[in-house]
Amino acid sequence: MLLHIPKVLTPEQVAQMRDVLDRTDWEDGRNTAGPQAARVKRNQQLTEEHPVAQQLGDTLLKALGRNELFLSAALPHRVFPPLFNRYCDGGEFGMHVDTAVRDVRGKGIRVRTDLSATLFLSEPHEYDGGELVMDDTYGAHAAKLPAGDMVLYPSTSLHRVNAVTRGARVAAICWVQSLVREDAQRTLLYEMDTALQALNRSVPEHPSLLQLTGVYHNLLRRWADL
Ligand SMILES: O=C(O)CCC(=O)C(=O)O
Ligand SMILES: [Fe+2]
């Protein structure tokens, strides 16, 4: 499932992050790429170990922890500490697939990447190009979202970022290990949760709601992988 999550960060939080990021010395993105990605990765980044990434990443993780759409769709078990990236002067990231398992350095924790997420920190009018293009069984989908919005997509998909030919595109990147590994199962639970929430708003006393809520939890119990 590919999902647009609007307003993960407030305009004030975006402005604060941009203020810090625009004054930071960025590193070459190829430093952390595997051999396949290194051939096609031309951007700048702050890895999760950079103090600026840690400070801003904490704010983003707190916002995600309160975001009902993210929690319902991702069913997060572990989130890899966010890193930040920047594309300018023709910078791009060619077609690649994300590393399946990432080590959280110094913590002895590994995160299986079930979901990838890009949180846009530049407004679309600030740059040309820079679309995140994801392939799935239905074809290619492009995302270029307002600052503060996030796109969430299965890490199994091949994806790329088009060259930025004017201005700069700044973003935060996250990977999520979900309680539910399979995208198809996770999508069913998300759709069911969305329907249950709508029923809870419109017919909260309906007796079948209890039974359906039970079905949701029993499916999650069956599929959750802890
Ligand atoms: O910049 C983006 O939107 C995606 C970056 C990406 O695909 C990656 O870091 O693996
Ligand atoms: Fe990627």
Image (cartoon, helix red, strand yellow):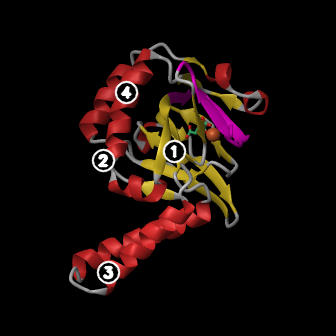
Frontmost residue, 103 versus 128: 103
In the image, residue 48 sits, relative to residue 130, either above or below, namely above
Identified at 44% across, 75% down, the residue is 215
Tell me residue 217's x, y (percent): 43, 67
Relative to 22, does residue 212 appear above or below in the rendering? Answer: below
Mark 3–mark 1 Cα distance, whole angstroms, equals 32 Å
Reading the image, the residue beneath label 3 is 209
Q: Secondary structure at mark 3?
A: helix
Q: Are marks 3 and 2 in contact (CB under 8 Å)?
A: no
* Residue type indicated by callout 1: Ala
- Identify the residue under disc 1: 117
Image quarter of residue 65: top left
Does residue 167 appear in the picture of this structure?
no
Report helix, strand or loop for mark 4.
helix
Q: Which mark is residue 66?
A: 2
| N-term mark: 3 or 2 | 2
